[in-house]
Image: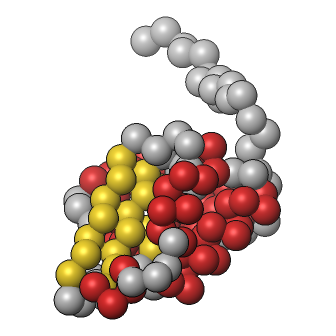
């Protein structure tokens, strides 16, 4: 058998985050973490469940949080969540990166609150918009 050269690490367009050497997350490349999340999210049809999954994923370690990259999908249920997201996106100027937005509202939310419409206008790159209106909005 011929000796095979050692496999060289793949180059990436970004700096790999550093973890403590004894951290189990340090052994996983960022590409693997991204693929793990993508596979897990494929099974979730609800944008609210996907968002909850992203939040849990990014709590594991700094590397996992970094692997998620810039969030492009948001889901809000309440008037307070809608207001908070609207303010956060307008403050940071990130409305242009939002590609998917899910709004879950109850019928009583629809009376005088212009926030959902203002949020949609703020998100200029939306490719997918889901609006769930009913007597009861989706819940945890």
Q: Is residue 71 above or below residue 138?
A: above
Horizontally, is 92 left or right of 135 in the view? right
Q: How is the image coloured?
A: secondary structure
Residue under the image location 78 percent in, 62 percent down: 91
Residue under the image location 72 percent in, 59 percent down: 90
From where the camera sits, is residue 27 visible?
no
* Residue 26: percent from left, percent from top: 67, 58
Tally of numbered discs: 0
Q: Quadrant of the C terminus?
A: bottom left
Residue under the image location 70 percent in, 70 percent down: 87
Q: Is residue 47 above or below residue 98?
A: below
Q: Is residue 103 above or below residue 27?
A: below
Q: Based on the displayed image, in which of its 4 quarters is residue 80 positioned?
A: bottom right
* Residue 36: percent from left, percent from top: 41, 54
Farthest residue toward the top? 2
Q: Nearer the viewer, residue 117 or 80?
A: 117
Q: Is residue 4 above or below residue 107?
A: above
* Residue 110: percent from left, percent from top: 37, 80
Horizontally, is 31 left or right of 38 in the view? right
Q: Quadrant of the N terminus?
A: top left
């Amino acid at each position: 058998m011929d000796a095979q050269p050692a496999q060289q690490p793949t180059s990436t367009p970004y700096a790999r985050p550093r973890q403590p050497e004894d951290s189990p997350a340090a052994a996983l490349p960022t590409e693997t973490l991204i693929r793990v999340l993508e596979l897990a999210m494929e099974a979730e049809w609800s944008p609210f469940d996907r968002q909850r999954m992203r939040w849990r994923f990014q709590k594991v370690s700094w590397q996992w949080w970094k692997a998620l990259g810039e969030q492009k999908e948001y889901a809000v249920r309440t008037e307070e969540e809608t207001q908070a997201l609207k303010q956060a996106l307008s403050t940071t100027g990130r409305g242009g990166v939002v590609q998917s937005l899910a709004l879950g509202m109850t019928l009583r939310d629809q009376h005088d609150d212009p926030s959902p419409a203002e949020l949609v206008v703020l998100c200029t790159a939306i490719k997918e918009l889901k609006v769930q209106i009913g007597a009861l909005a989706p819940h945890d």
